[in-house]
């Protein structure tokens, strides 16, 4: 049994060929002021450890810290002659089996050119995988059209509920507030120039053609897009995706197709809902700010906004929904089975989806610049 009150550690040399190790070789005694410095000084006076006979049987208390100091003093190997007790043998056997501790090499610093090349290669890899995902979705969609009775209707219905119905609250709140803010700001400028009646035109065109689809898409990308990526990522972490392949269930037909189809159906409906609530908010603000009654607002709105703008907004909803679904599934399937990759993949999915939606909206503005005016 170890003596907890052991004396200071000592290296005694009874003869030129022997070293007696005595005292307490525990962290408490080794951490005493001057203990390590004294042992180092004695060690420097000794010949190489391999040429001496070390007797550790006189040690009163020994822990792994003391054993490690002796092991380092021997150069990481047992001396030629070593006398140990049974308990000490276990400690040194574990030290011998653990081997040398090696610190990881410091990572080399990459030059800006290397960083640019790595970024370009990563972007190219993502682009190729995204194109392949579109092709797989097209094949799955054709199979779904040929055999609709075997389609994933339950999955589509469940995703419609989560993506569409559960998003009505947040889209209504944001849409109403945006309508109020836009109406107040526009009313102040129009009132300065005596153009109060044109507030209906500004609100109708901006909300129905641009803000409604864009707001709904950004909210869905942040809410549902991140959820889809996280779901697929967790399935990767828990190896459910691998289990599906073993069972013969394709990822595209059972996971990607239902989510993309649900988004393509839900997004136009959310656009209609967001447009209506935003116009109600703008109409309410116009009533209080300029005195434009709701009856006047509703009567002038059809003339101020041609039907083509409404159809363009619905078309944007479909395209934005498909893009958000594809981006979310793409990053979800590329997640590696660890939590760090899950977090980075979800963040990349949301940022990429919002960026692609804005780029697509700009392309719509260029293509339909002469339509609806």
Image (tube, rainbow, N blue to C red):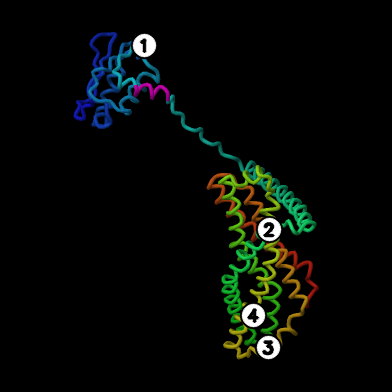
On the image, the x and y values in percent for residue 23 come to 22, 23
214 or 133: nearer the viewer: 133
How far apart are the two marked residues, 2 and 1, measured between alpha carbons? 72 Å
- Magenta segment boundaries in residue numbering: 90-97
| Residue at which label 3 appears | 197
Q: Which quadrant is the C terminus positioned in? A: bottom right
**Residue at the top extreme, as displayed:** 16
Nearest to the eye among marks 4 and 2: give it. Answer: 2
Q: Quadrant of residue 364?
A: bottom right
Q: Is residue 338 left or right of residue 82?
A: right
How far apart are the two marked residues, 1 and 3, measured between alpha carbons? 102 Å
Q: Is residue 170 left or right of residue 56?
A: right
316 or 13: nearer the viewer: 316
How far apart are the two marked residues, 4 and 3, measured between alpha carbons? 15 Å
| Residue at which label 1 appears | 80
Tell me the chief SS of the magenta region. helix
Task: Classify mark 1: helix, strand or loop.
Answer: loop
Badge 2 or badge 1: first in the primary sequence? 1
Nearest to the eye among marks 1 and 3: give it. Answer: 1
| Residue at which label 4 appears | 279
Task: Classify mark 2: helix, strand or loop.
Answer: helix
How far apart are the two marked residues, 4 and 2, measured between alpha carbons? 32 Å
| Residue at which label 2 appears | 258
How far apart are the two marked residues, 3 and 2, measured between alpha carbons? 45 Å
Circles 4, 3 touching at the beta carbon (< 8 Å): no
What number is the disc on residue 333? none
């Amino acid at each position: 049994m170890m003596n907890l009150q052991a004396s200071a550690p000592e290296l005694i040399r009874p003869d030129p060929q022997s070293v007696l190790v005595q005292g307490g070789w525990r962290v408490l005694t080794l951490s005493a002021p001057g203990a390590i410095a004294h042992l180092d000084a004695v060690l420097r006076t000794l010949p190489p450890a391999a040429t001496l006979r070390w007797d550790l049987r006189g040690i009163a208390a020994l822990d792994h810290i003391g054993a490690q100091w002796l092991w380092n003093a021997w150069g990481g190997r047992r001396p030629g002659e070593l006398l140990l007790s049974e308990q000490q043998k276990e400690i040194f056997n574990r030290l011998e089996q653990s081997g040398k501790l090696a610190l990881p090499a410091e990572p080399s610093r990459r030059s800006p050119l290397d960083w640019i090349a790595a970024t370009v290669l990563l972007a190219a890899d993502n682009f190729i995988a995204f194109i392949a995902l579109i092709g797989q979705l097209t094949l799955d969609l054709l199979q779904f059209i040929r055999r609709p009775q075997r389609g994933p209707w339950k999955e589509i219905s469940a995703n419609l509920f989560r993506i569409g119905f559960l998003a009505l609250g947040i889209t209504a709140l944001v849409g109403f507030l945006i309508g109020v803010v836009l109406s107040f700001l526009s009313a102040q400028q129009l009132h300065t120039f005596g153009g109060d009646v044109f507030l209906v035109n500004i609100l109708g065109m901006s909300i129905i053609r641009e803000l409604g689809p864009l707001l709904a898409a950004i909210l869905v990308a942040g809410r549902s897009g991140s959820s889809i990526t996280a779901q697929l990522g967790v399935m990767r972490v828990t190896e459910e995706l691998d289990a599906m392949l073993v069972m013969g269930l394709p990822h595209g037909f059972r996971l990607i197709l239902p989510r993309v189809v649900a988004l393509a159906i839900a997004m136009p409906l959310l656009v209609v809902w967001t447009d209506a609530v935003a116009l109600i908010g703008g109409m309410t603000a116009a009533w209080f700010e300029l005195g434009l009654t709701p009856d006047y607002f509703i009567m002038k709105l059809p003339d101020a906004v041609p039907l083509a703008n409404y159809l363009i907004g619905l078309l944007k909803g479909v395209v934005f929904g498909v893009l958000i679904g594809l981006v979310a599934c793409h990053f979800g399937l590329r997640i590696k089975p660890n939590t760090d990759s899950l977090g980075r993949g979800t963040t990349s999915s949301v940022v990429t989806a919002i960026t692609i939606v804005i780029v697509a909206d700009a392309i719509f503005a260029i293509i339909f610049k002469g339509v609806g005016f």
